[in-house]
């Protein structure tokens, strides 16, 4: 049998090739990590663990995700806010490791989240993950679109204070730019975009933290209140809303899709990539959350840059970093939606008519997607509300609930008795607790959206 069609395979201890079958495009491997025989479709994966870290950091550590954290802590109060932030960080890092461990399970590679769910839970698992993944992707991109428009408008107003362009104009500008980027074929093709996005994350965080401390020192500290504001019901709904906001801040609904870009040994490289990304997250998320709450207390805005006043040039620079970072994140979250509706089995043998039809479908889907996202973002630019509801009913089921349940169902538990009971208990507690968080976060977010709709008109220039 000829094997010229095969991509170059890096020799590792993780898997050893036994036979090849060009007729069906499959290769049989012995998996040294799990033991046994693994049968999966040949797929050239060249990504390093560093590139995986860029992808993971880009999808999680975005200004749209951590800019609301000071507001979330202000809504929960210091003790509950800090404990929620720390527990969410640890829980999602742990859940990400579980998903990475399950990527090659039951003799197959599962290159998308929905197919991993199908292999473990059957058809309902596929439908469950598909629904919540699409919900998370759409909600995330709406929030990103609003955040990008807000940052672009802030830069515009800094340089042209009397300018007449509105938030909606900048949301449309960003949408047009993302439409061009959406034609990049896959996540791996975004590696350089996401590398720049990751460094922009660090730039945004450093600039925002510095300006926050600078502004905080200028404010009369005796005027800052750190207590919860409003009536009892306002405090309760504000706390519910904040839980959804924190859940959104750690949203990553496409880990298997990212792992599908990583070279062998895929699991070990993904473990390293996830851990490196979470190092960036801890160094950025926690610092912005804590300094923002210290500087502004209960007056912290849902988008922290809106709380900053001087120096203007530094605030403009932070907003530019935000737009650059958001650009890469937006594209990663487009991919699951495109994958659901496109025929991935492109064929070079198709005639010219079929190829043209596929090209039109390819371009048309992206145009329709961007029109929908841009229209909703421009019509209802309530950033904080979208962040919360997306976190509550989009990311929480995928990032907190599903990984632990899937690991239990797959039977991949430690053999050591003490460790078994610890992991088993952890995998039960996390889904129960964060299911409650999802319900409360959804209640809080819906309440705030209803209140905002009463206050603002559609297409309001926030």
Image (cartoon, helix red, strand yellow):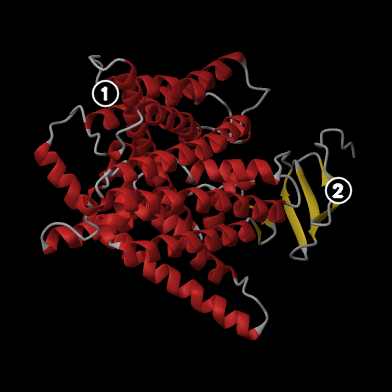
Q: Residue at x 33, y 67 (%)?
A: 79
Element under label 1? helix
Q: Is residue 327 left or right of residue 447?
A: right
Could one spot residue 251 in this view of the protein?
no
Q: Provide the residue designation for mark 1.
A: 168
Q: Residue at x 45, y 56 (%)?
A: 398
Query: Image quarter for residue 154?
Result: top left
Residue 120: x, y in percent?
Answer: 55, 62
Query: Image quarter for residue 108?
Result: bottom right
Quarter of the picture containing the C terminus is: top left
* Spatial separation of the CA atoms under disc 1 and disc 2: 52 Å
Residue 402: x, y in percent?
Answer: 47, 61
Q: Nearer the viewer, mark 1 or mark 2?
A: 1
Disc 2 crowd rating (10 Å Cα; few below 14, some 14-19, many 20+) is few
All told, the count of numbered labels is 2
Residue 113: x, y in percent?
Answer: 53, 50
Disc 1 crowd rating (10 Å Cα; few below 14, some 14-19, many 20+) is many
Query: Image quarter for residue 197?
Result: top right
The extreme bottom residue here reads 417
Q: Nearer the viewer, residue 118 or 430?
A: 430
Q: Residue at x 53, y 23 (%)?
A: 183
Q: Is disc 1 in contact with disc 2, using a CB cutoff of under 8 Å?
A: no
Quarter of the picture containing the N terminus is: top right
Q: Nearer the viewer, residue 257 or 56?
A: 56
Earlier-in-chain disc, 1 versus 2: 2
Q: Provide the residue designation for mark 2.
A: 11
Q: Nearer the viewer, residue 2 or 69?
A: 69
Could one spot residue 187 in this view of the protein?
yes
Residue 169: x, y in percent?
Answer: 29, 19
Q: Residue at x 40, y 19 (%)?
A: 176
Q: Is residue 360 left or right of residue 64?
A: right
Q: Is residue 336 above or below residue 282?
A: above
């Amino acid at each position: 049998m000829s094997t010229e069609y095969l991509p170059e395979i890096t020799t590792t201890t993780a898997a050893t090739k036994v036979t090849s079958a060009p007729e069906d495009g499959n290769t049989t491997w012995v998996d040294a990590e799990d033991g046994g025989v693994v049968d999966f479709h040949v797929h050239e994966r060249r990504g390093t663990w560093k590139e995986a870290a860029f992808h993971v950091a880009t999808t999680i550590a975005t200004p749209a995700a951590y800019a609301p954290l000071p507001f979330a802590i202000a809504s929960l109060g210091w003790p509950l806010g800090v404990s929620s932030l720390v527990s969410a960080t640890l829980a999602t890092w742990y859940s990400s490791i579980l998903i990475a461990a399950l990527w090659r399970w039951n003799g197959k590679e599962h290159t998308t989240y929905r197919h991993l769910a199908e292999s473990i839970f059957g058809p309902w698992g596929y439908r469950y993950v598909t629904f919540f993944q699409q919900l998370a992707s759409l909600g995330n991109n709406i929030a990103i679109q609003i955040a990008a428009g807000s940052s672009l408008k802030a830069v515009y107003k800094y340089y042209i204070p009397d300018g007449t362009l509105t938030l909606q104009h900048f949301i449309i500008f960003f949408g047009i730019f993302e439409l061009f980027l959406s034609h990049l074929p896959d996540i791996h093709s975004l590696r350089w975009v996401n590398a720049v996005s990751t460094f922009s994350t660090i730039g945004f965080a450093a600039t925002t933290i510095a300006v926050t401390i600078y502004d905080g020192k200028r404010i009369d500290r005796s005027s800052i209140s750190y207590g919860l504001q409003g009536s009892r019901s306002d405090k309760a709904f504000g706390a519910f809303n904040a839980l959804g906001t924190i859940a959104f801040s750690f949203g990553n609904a496409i880990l298997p899709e990212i792992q599908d870009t990583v070279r062998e040994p895929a699991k070990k490289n993904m473990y390293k990539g996830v851990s490196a990304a979470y190092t960036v997250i801890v160094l950025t998320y926690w610092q912005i959350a804590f300094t923002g709450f210290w500087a502004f207390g209960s007056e912290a805005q849902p988008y922290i840059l809106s709380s900053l006043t001087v120096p203007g040039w530094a605030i403009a620079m932070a907003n530019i970093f935000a737009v650059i970072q958001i650009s890469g994140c937006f594209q990663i979250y487009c991919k699951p939606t495109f994958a659901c509706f496109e025929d991935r089995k492109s064929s070079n043998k198709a005639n010219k008519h079929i190829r043209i039809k596929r090209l039109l479908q390819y371009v048309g889907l992206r145009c329709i997607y961007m029109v929908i996202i841009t229209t909703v973002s421009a019509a209802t630019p309530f950033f904080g509300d979208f962040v919360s509801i997306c976190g509550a009913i989009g990311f929480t089921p995928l990032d907190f609930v599903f990984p632990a349940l899937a690991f239990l169902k797959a039977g991949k538990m430690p053999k050591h008795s003490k460790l078994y009971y610890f992991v088993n208990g952890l995998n039960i507690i996390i889904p129960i607790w964060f299911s409650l968080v999802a319900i409360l976060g959804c209640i809080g977010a819906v309440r705030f959206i209803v209140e905002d709709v009463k206050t603002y008109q559609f297409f309001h220039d926030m």
